[in-house]
Amino acid sequence: MKLEDVVTVKIGRNLSRGNEKGDMTLVAYSYEDLIRDLEGLFLNSKTDTSNDEVQYDGYVSRAGDVVFSFVSSKSGIVSDVNQGKIINQNFAKLIIEHDGLDSSYLCYALNESHSMKKQMAISMQGSTVPKLTPSILKELEIKLPTLEKQRTIGKAYFYLRKQQALAKKQAELEEQLYLEVLRKLDY
């Protein structure tokens, strides 16, 4: 079935057109936010991006929203840390309209599924700047296993992403430690 049969693709707001009343306090959701949401690591202190005066207008992220980056062709689920940030035109919210689709599985399928990656590559052939468009995204075919299987796959996928991020962070910390020891030995 086509992606548009199970999700609504809501493109983010064009922020270059100027700010409307109340937009000055909003922080834009970024590619780095997407990667941190995928990794599930929040080592920095939580930044408060909430503003009681800002009305939810569909462009403001909420924890649990599935977002897709048109630039990197990656998707993730907005965390509590990134809730309240504005979704710009480089992203789309994927609003699940089908009870038989798990949000974690949707991210797995868009990010890792061989079938989806092949469809994306074919759709972007001939483009000077390979970038997925909303219309191409909506036309992608997605296979939906049972909801239980989707949840298992989605949970395992996010666990794997977190483990990879932890291993990377550990390697960085070990490198810093060894370099510091070497510097001290050098004196």
Image (cartoon, helix red, strand yellow):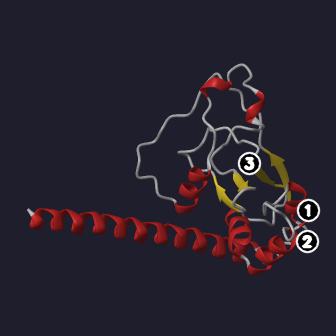
Q: Position of residue 110 (x, y in %)?
A: 74, 68
Which residue is labeled 2 in the image?
1
Secondary element under disc 3, as helix, strand or loop, is loop
Marks 2 and 1 close (CB-CB < 8 Å):
yes
Q: Quadrant of the N terminus?
A: bottom right
Please, is residue 148 above or below residue 187 in the view? below
Marks 3 and 1 close (CB-CB < 8 Å):
no
Q: Nearer the viewer, residue 155 or 165?
A: 165
- Residue 90: image tag: 3
In this rendering, position of residue 60 left or right of residue 3:
left
Q: Earlier in the sequence, mark 3 or mark 1?
A: 1
Q: Amino acid at mark 2?
A: Met
Q: Amino acid at mark 3?
A: Asn
Please, is residue 130 above or below residue 67 in the view? below
Q: Nearer the viewer, residue 158 or 164?
A: 164
**Extreme top residue here?**
21
Give the label, 3 or 1, closer to the camera: 3
Q: Residue at x 81, y 70 (%)?
A: 120
Q: Residue at x 78, y 29 (%)?
A: 17
Please, is residue 110 above or below residue 40 in the view? below
Marks 2 and 3 close (CB-CB < 8 Å):
no
Distance, label 3 to label 1, CA atoms, is 22 Å
Q: Quadrant of residue 187?
A: bottom left
Q: Quadrant of residue 150?
A: bottom right
Distance, label 2 to label 1, CA atoms, is 7 Å
Which residue is labeled 1 in the image?
5
